[in-house]
Image (tube, grey):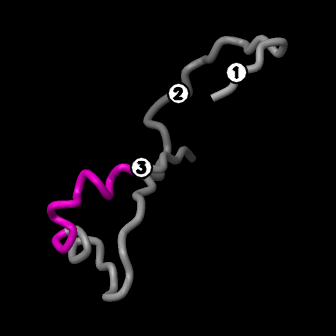
Amino acid sequence: MGSCIITSSEFLFASNKEMVRRMMGVPDGLDHVCTIALGYMDGEKPSTPQRNLDVISYI
């Protein structure tokens, strides 16, 4: 199973905040903070190149 957290959805739906709250069934007094997409891949998992364990990436 894969997942993806979408934190910018608050900005995407900022103008329609009440509509999104109704659609998602968010109770009064609570706010939508982020969206999480969950699901299984449709098909085979693509192969990934081997990682160089001597390389460190800082973000």
Q: Is residue 49 above or below residue 6?
A: above
Q: Which residue is mark 2?
A: 44
Residue at the front extreme, as displayed: 59
Report whether 21 appears left or right of 58. left
Q: Which residue is mark 3?
A: 6
Mark 2 to mark 3: distance in Å? 24 Å
Indicate which label's residue lies in the foreground, 2 or 1: 1
Q: Which residue is mark 1?
A: 57
Q: Nearer the viewer, residue 43 or 52?
A: 52
Residue for point 43% across, 36% down = 42
- Mark positioned earlier in the residue sequence (2 or 3): 3
**SS type, badge 1:** loop
Indicate which label's residue lies in the foreground, 2 or 3: 3
Check the picture and name the quadrant holding the C terminus: top right
Mark 2 to mark 1: distance in Å? 28 Å
- Local crowd at mark 2 within 10 Å, few (<14), some, or many (≥20)? few
Q: Which three-letter amino acid code belongs to the residue tagged 3?
A: Ile
